[in-house]
Image: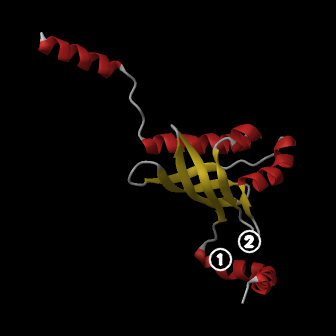
Amino acid sequence: MNKMFFLSCLLVVSWLPAQPPEETRIGAVLDAWHQAAARADFDGYFGKMAQGGVFVGTDATEHWDKDAFMAFSRPYFEKGQAWSFTPLERHIYLAEGGQVAWFDELLDTWMQLCRGSGVVVKVGEEWKIAHYVLSMTIPNASAEGAIALKKEKDSVLKRSLLLTQPN
């Protein structure tokens, strides 16, 4: 009798859908986040970010908390022209305890290849993006040209930042 009960339970459990690994769930959140931007779905996009989340953009001055990033982005979403990033490669790393993970991804964007990296946190049963950094990739062979291109503006910004630092 116990053997028959055990086999019946095993059969029922085998029919239940398997819970995807956390890395798969995190990848799905990131995919949905990028898709929401491509569709200019403001609520869908920002709903994937954690309260107090941060977005760091490609410009040296772009470091926004979630509210500031929402304010900056709203006009683009309202015009129906946000941005479209397509992941080409992604690596996800789950911290011990399973409540925090970090990732990096190579993206096809209007700026050509970019690198996204960030941290996701588990809020209840959902993964939320707590920190995201978008960087333009520059081939090593082209680094000198890129440095020359940005040198003047970077120098001005560095001077400005150094002047605002306490002694």
Q: How many marks?
A: 2
Residue 124 drawn at (x, y percent):
52, 39
- Looking at the rendered image, the quarter that the C terminus falls into is bottom right
Of the pair 18 and 51, the residue shown nearer to us: 51
Q: How is the image coloured?
A: secondary structure
- The residue at 72%/53% (across/down) is 66
* Left or right: residue 135 compared with residue 103: right
Of the pair 166 and 118, the residue shown nearer to us: 166
Three-letter amino acid code of the residue under disc 2 = Ala
Q: Is residue 89 above or below residue 29?
A: below
- The residue at 42%/55% (across/down) is 95
- The residue at 70%/38% (across/down) is 44
Residue 130 drawn at (x, y percent):
60, 53
* Left or right: residue 112 compared with residue 152: left
Q: Which residue is mark 2?
A: 60
Can residue 91 be seen by looking at this rendering?
no
Q: Earlier in the sequence, mark 1 or mark 2?
A: 2
Q: Locate residue 151: give its quadrant.
A: bottom right
Q: Which residue is mark 1?
A: 142
Instruction: Tell me whether the residue at label 1 lies in contact with that at label 2, contact meaning CB atoms closer than 8 angstroms.
Output: no
Of the pair 43 and 125, the residue shown nearer to us: 125
Q: Dot 2, crowdedness within 10 Å: few (<14), some or many (≥20)?
A: few
How far apart are labels 1 and 2 at the CA level? Answer: 19 Å
Q: Is residue 155 above or below residue 109?
A: below
Q: Secondary structure at mark 1?
A: helix
